[in-house]
Amino acid sequence: MVENSLQDIGPDKSLLLVDDDEPFLRRLAKAMEKRGFEVETAQSVAAGKAIATARTPAYAVVDLRLEDGNGLEVVEVLRDKREDCRVIVLTGYGAIATAVAAVKIGAADYLAKPADAQDVMNALLAPEGELPPPPENPMSADRVRWEHIQRVYEQCDRNVSETARRLNMHRRTLQRILAKRSPR
């Protein structure tokens, strides 16, 4: 069920989604359209900056790490072009330093992937200065750990030895984790 009604969005329903994970981008775009937004998508920093410059949206959700650079570059363009643009930084690489950097340049909130559409909607429409409500079904700590391991594994081109080295983990331990199903 969609908790927020269309009048919560406001008269300008434009939303820019910038993410290089195409399946995630398509799912989120579809879900946000169902919630009343007029969605435009980009899969790179360059495309995001071009859209932000040409048609600055009222709302934006920007991935932090993109193939051609840092999503914070898109956030800077959005804030320069439209001060009231509500920007959410979405990333799979949660770290205090990047959260601080995102907020300093004007992001309203910082969400860790995988965030569902309702979490994104709540963050976009939270009153200024207020935090959105916590998610109803947050991921377990085991699931967050598993997602992180999977992401690093994919970044290392599915190389178990390199992934284990980067995670500071024994290779056999990593192999056992990768052989199991994802936790709930």
Image (tube, helix red, strand yellow):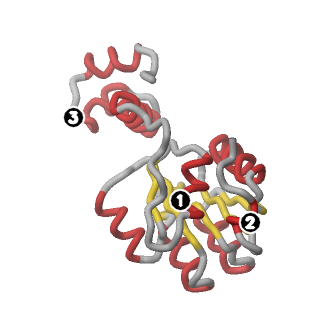
Report the quarter where the C terminus lies: top left
Q: Which residue is mark 1?
A: 123
Residue placed at 53% from the left, 72% from the top? 75
Q: In the rendered structure, which amino acid carries the disc numbered 3?
A: Asn
User: Could you tell me if the residues under marks 1 and 2 are in contact, i.e. CB atoms within 8 Å?
Assistant: no
Q: Residues within 10 Å of mark 2 (few under 14, many from 20)?
A: few
Dot 1 or dot 2: first in sequence order is 2
**Secondary structure of the residue carrying numbered label 3:** loop
Task: Give coordinates of residue 153: x percent, y percent.
Answer: 41, 32
- In this view, the residue in front, 117 or 97, is 117
Dot 3 or dot 1: first in sequence order is 1
Q: Which residue is mark 2?
A: 7
- Nearest to viewer (mark 1 / mark 2): 2
Report the quarter where the N terminus lies: top right
Residue at mark 3 to residue at mark 2: CA–CA distance: 49 Å
Task: Give coordinates of residue 118: x percent, y percent.
Answer: 60, 48
Residue 79, quarter of the rendered image: bottom right
Q: Which residue is mark 3?
A: 168
Q: In the rendered structure, which amino acid carries the disc numbered 1?
A: Ala
- Nearest to viewer (mark 3 / mark 2): 2
Q: Looking at the picture, does residue 15 appear above or below residue 175?
A: below
